[in-house]
Image (cartoon, rainbow, N blue to C red):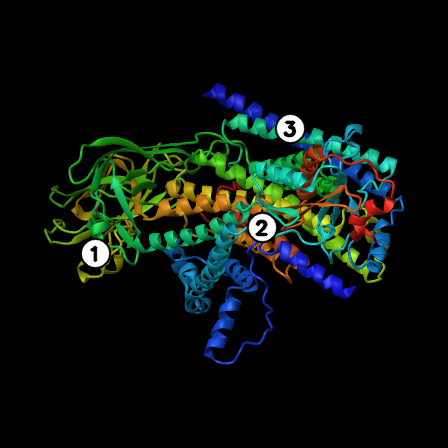
Amino acid sequence: MNLAAATNENLAHTSNVLIYSSMAVYTLAFFAHIAEWIFGSRSKVGRTAAALKQDTAATAGPVVRVKGARQGGTAVLDRPEVVTRSAAGTRDVPDGPGAAGGTFKGDLWGRIAVSLTVVAFAVQAGGVVARALSVRRAPWGNMYEFSITFSTVAVGAYLVLLALRKNVRWIGLLLVTTVLLDLGIATTTLYTDSDQLVPALHSYWLWIHVSTAIICGAVFYLGAVGTLLYLFRDSYENKIASGGKPGKFATSVLERLPAAKSLDTFAYRINAAVFPLWTFTIIAGAIWAGDAWGRYWGWDPKEVWSFITWVAYAAYLHARATAGWKGRKAAYLALVAFGCWLFNYYGVNIFVTGKHSYAGV
Amino acid sequence: MSNLNTTDERDLSTAGEQLSTAPREESATSVPAMGVIGWARWFWRQLTSMRVALILLFLLSLGAIPGSLIPQNSVDEMKVETFKGDHTTLAPLYEKLQLFDVYSSVWFSAIYILLFVSLIGCIVPRTGQFVGQLRGRPPGAPRKLTRLPAYTTWRTEAEPERVREAALGLLRGRRYRSHTVGDAVAAEKGYLREAGNLLFHIALIVMLIAFGWGQLFKFEGGKLILEGDGFANTKTQYNNFRPGTLFSDDDLVPFSFDLDEFRATYERTGPQRGTPRTFEAHVTYSEGVDGKPQKRVIKVNQPLVVDGTKVYLNAHGYAPVISVKDGKGKEVYRNVVPLLPQDDNITSTGAIKVMDGYRDADGKKTQLGFQAFFVPTFAGEGSGTMFSQFPALDYPVLALNGYYGSLGVDSGLPQNVYQLDPSKMTAFKDSNGDQLKQRLRPGETMKLPDGAGSVTFEGVQEWASFQISRQPASGWALTGSVAAIAGLAGSLFIQRRRVWVRAVPGADGVTVVEMAGLGRSESARLPEELADLAGELHSVAPTAPEPESEQTSEEPAEGAEK
């Protein structure tokens, strides 16, 4: 018993060191991203404005040629090329060049930032695993453990998107900032020594219910970042389209982001992809509650807020298909929905007492 | 020109029609026709519109909020009572607004019932339309394929019929529903999107009905059982019993169980010292009136399930064994008295009530009452307070103070067994004239003054409390939720799209092939898929050598001139 306890403490200590180390590396990544944005600001892009002015001249969207055939190369040179066209009435603005603004130095710093993020992610993931090994259970027994896993998964999802060659590097700076914030809160106010679980958490549903809850939150976060930037970029594009001139800083930052339409699509795809998983999380929780508390749904505060979050995201998905609600209004709904998720995590755990009181704070 | 454009628009909207069964948006400002029927139709159309559904969804989430912040009767009645005591001005207002029972309140019910009516009003016509679409075939190609979101064209020497045949074969091979209309092949895929959408919404209704049914026919009861004691599932045996509105006593399944042993372990060291690690109730149960006894362990996450009725381990605590002797030294009371835990370390309180059989020093009949405070782990001799330091029975101490007189149990009012009402009683005094108080270790005895007898703390037993409940239709709720997830995945991940392939003889006798795709939403995958299909078709009907005249090859792409 004593021997086991000693190993545990060693591992728990290792976990803490790893988490702190990852914070150091994330800080470096943060500065690298800042450098990327600063060097990128020296390029004069001005593509958005040009495109929008051209757009006002043509009534329908311009034709964009895409490479249709998947296998490139000389053998299929004579293959038919697919021409795409946006629906009438939508603005067709090209995506910005990214934070680096097409500059060599900016791009270099961006690559350094991503590499640092990969390193930090690996270290942080090691911290989470060490924590799990130190207690020999899923590392999601209290808010500290939930928080460190949460940001690990968010970064992991971002890196997966990058690896799939999706255009997501623009998330980098905000993501790293948020991760630092999350880890900062986790290590200072939420910190709980590694320990065993209370009997109510002794269930394999912990692995299912809590892991999906973390994944949903982490990916919803990426969607929320997309939505937030969409709102900024959209008002920027609107201003230009109506002949206005946005501020210098706003122009510098926003013109390098993807087009509002791309950001909106990105956010929608993310949210729509995670929504079924969130539904599953709630249902898995209900099944677990049925075993642990004798009823599968009892309007416990955590249940209520996960329900509210669900309804808010459902409203968002419906709004996107409803005339008069698409675009900005739907985006506000998406932000409200993510706000509900956040409140469900921080607010309900800290300010409301219910059956989900495992926060350890 | 404008004339041509409107024909084109109509042509295009025909091509895209029924690609989903989403309701057409009604203008909210449209003035209803006069008369009751007109208003009713207007109201129905509003209710089933997406806009109102959105508002109802929003109201539903908004309405759920107060229930998570204000104590609810359905969750914790004690908390509601405390809240009412603390907020004397606010409470009556909340009461009126049903804020203590949000989820069964009239206004909350109104929101979700309206939402579900709206839902039904939406999915019934959509199901009809979808069945119609399944029976029908994808519409023919629009005149100008160039205007569709994805388009490609090339010239080939293959015959138009051969190209169409090849296209039909190709599309069918890819599980498109395809047929030839005139000079073009029309194909459609992804019907499962709409099927999933409908399945999801129907599953929501199933879940709601199952939940409602479960609430109406459920029962829930609590029972505190001492180690060694038993329980049989009849209404009278419960300490408290909360049936649903339509529950009848015949729904109680006959079974019984004995609590053989209760085991609890706690964290002994570290900052989380005292946190429970295991709770186990070892029981022997038998199904039916006299079934074969079977052994089982009930844990927090592992209820005992007998024919749909579940027995959950709820809480546990301690019950001192108390004996009382009267003035003549005759034992008049011996009982195991369960006490209620007050904190995480199981500091417990309760009452010992000696109702009859006791006579005081003068031989006069009276009743005795004791307020009992119990700590399983006392801090230590001299320094300890009556707050437990640890939840296990490491150093149990029982503190008693005694009263004599009338317990007030004959007044007819129901009495809390854990509380003593000393209003008609007199406290025992010690030699200094203070109230008699004594801390007892197991086996120790407290002498009552003036030969009034004695109380002995014989030992401690453990008790466990169980929640016994049955909620019918949970199988349906589960089925509904699994179907909901499946439907949701189908409706969000499957793309519904149409592809047309037109092959007509060009001016110079060479076949012109045009392909176009249309999806419900602009999908990144649609152009890719079209390119894929075009590649396949191209291998059957390869590009013809460039004609001498440039004009003819330009012709099919005329829509792209900008």
Can you say whether B115 is above or below A170 in the image? below
Quarter that holds the C terminus of chain A? top right
Tell me where residue B335 appears, x and y as whole percent.
19, 42
Q: Secondary structure at mark 1?
A: loop
Q: Are marks 1 and 2 on the same chain?
A: yes
Q: Residue at x 37, y 42 (%)?
A: B347
Which residue matches tag 2? Answer: B138
The single residue placed furthest to the bottom in the displayed view is B34
Q: Which residue is mark 1?
A: B407
Q: Nearer the viewer, residue A52 or B503?
A: B503
Looking at the rendered structure, the secondary structure element under dot 3 is helix
The amino acid marked with disc number 2 is Pro
Left or right of B101 in this view: A220: right
Please provide percent x and percent y for residue B177: 56, 44
Label 3 belongs to which residue? Answer: A17
Q: Quadrant of residue B228?
A: top left
